[in-house]
Image (tube, helix red, strand yellow):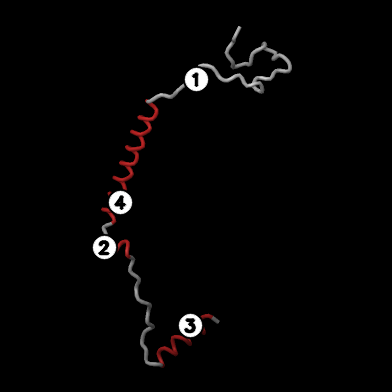
Amino acid sequence: MATVLMRSGVLRAALRGGSKVSAPPKRGFASSAHHDDAYEAAKWAKITYLGIATCTVLAIHNLSKGHHHSEESPPYPYLHVRNKDFPWGPDGLFEKKHH
């Protein structure tokens, strides 16, 4: 059925005097019309490497400064509640021994 419709459309176009079916105009893309693709790829590669270098320098700077450590944590009453002793002793497994 599709071939019959196709033939009739082609036949009608031939009878009207049009020898070929007009195609829509070709669409031009603005991104590749005026720019070289290799230039754009090289530009973004340079931007990427500059970003990586910048992030690396900032990370090294931030990590090398150090940070403040408090000597003693505040003695909050709800911390270290022990209702019974651990099997390995009175302190936690990874805590400092204060004996």
Dot 2: within a 10 Å radius of its alpha carbon, few (fewer than 14), some, or many (20 or more) residues?
Answer: few
Per the rendering, the mark at residue 34 is: 2
Q: For mark 4, give the secondary structure.
A: helix
Nearer to us: label 3 or label 1: 1
Residue 28 lies, in percent from the top left, at 33, 69
Among the two numbered marks 3 and 1 on one chain, the one whose residue lies closer to the N terminus: 3
Residue 47 lies, in percent from the top left, at 31, 45
Name the residue furthest right.
84
Among the two numbered marks 1 and 2 on one chain, the one whose residue lies closer to the N terminus: 2
Among the two numbered marks 4 and 3 on one chain, the one whose residue lies closer to the N terminus: 3
Nearer to us: label 1 or label 4: 1
Kindly report the distance in space between the C-alpha atoms of the residues bearing marks 1 and 2. 61 Å
Kindly report the distance in space between the C-alpha atoms of the residues bearing marks 3 and 1. 84 Å
Nearer to us: label 4 or label 3: 4
Q: Residue at x 66, y 21 (%)?
A: 77
86 lies above or below 28: above
Q: Amino acid at mark 3?
A: Met
Q: For mark 2, give the secondary structure.
A: loop
The one nearer the camera, 77 or 96, is: 77
Residue, disc 1: 70
Nearer to us: label 1 or label 2: 1
Residue, disc 4: 41
**Tag 3 and tag 1, C-beta contact below 8 Å:** no
Q: Amino acid at mark 2?
A: His
Kindly report the distance in space between the C-alpha atoms of the residues bearing marks 4 and 3. 45 Å
Q: How many marks?
A: 4
**Tag 1 and tag 4, C-beta contact below 8 Å:** no
Kindly report the distance in space between the C-alpha atoms of the residues bearing marks 4 and 2. 14 Å
